[in-house]
Amino acid sequence: MLNQALQFVADILDQFVKNRFGLDESKVLLNNLIESNGAVPQTNQNKIVVSMINIEKETNQAFYNWSKKLDSNNYSDVSPYDRFNIDILISSNFDDYLETLRFLNEILVFFQVHPRIEAGNFSNIPAGINKLEFEIEKINYVQMQGLWTSMGAKYVPSVIYKMRLLTIQGNEADAYLPAISNTSNLLTA
């Protein structure tokens, strides 16, 4: 689900940028900023690069439901779903600095226009994702420097968004329970 959500965000951001600039060529890709050998991936050149930089479990959940109703009207016990917030770094990596700023501006416009993406508004949203919410992460210069240094990369103009509430549910049944079909034998208080 994680890769599908990130790829979906990269794809709709790419379509937005292509529409805004009248481009045929894709300008957004989901990729790491630095290869394991320390080199900058050549595919990142003159692109907007979407990268996951952090994942955290959302601990504020309304209700843990262990039972899931099956088509047969029986129930199965499953582990409750988990929700995650994903920090994504979106870097504008172009040879021309003015191009870098133009594309970075369009990234900001995209998330200003689409702070929330819901299944009802995007027909191509991956199955299992109902909505994604985006919030810009406020980090200062020192934190940004620490982030880029820890990645082993040279800074390029970028922005960080928190993608909220990605739901992960394994749907692995622990047990199957029959539905109650006869209430005559139940104790009453």
Image (cartoon, grey):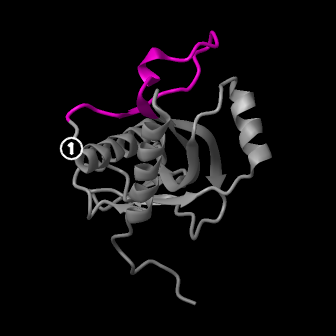
Range shown magenta: 24-48
Q: Residue furthest top?
A: 37
Was residue 28 drawn as part of the magenta stretch in this picture?
A: yes
Name the residue at 57% across, 40% down. Answer: 157
Could you tell me the amino acid type at mark 1? Gly
In which quadrant will I find the N terminus?
Answer: top left
Name the residue at 55% across, 38% down. Answer: 52
Dot 1: within a 10 Å radius of its alpha carbon, few (fewer than 14), some, or many (20 or more) residues?
few
Classify 17 as above or below 72.
Answer: above
Q: Residue furthest right?
A: 142
Classify 172 as above or below 162.
Answer: above
Name the residue at 65% across, 26% down. Answer: 154
Our reading of the magenta stretch's main secondary structure is: loop
Q: Secondary structure at mark 1?
A: loop
Regarding residue 179, the answer to whether it shows in the image is: yes
- In the depicted view, which residue is nearer to us: 177 or 96? 96
In which quadrant will I find the C terminus?
Answer: bottom right
What is the x, y in percent for residue 65? 52, 63
Residue 123 left/right relative to 99: left
> Label 1, on which residue?
22
What is the x, y in percent for residue 71? 26, 57
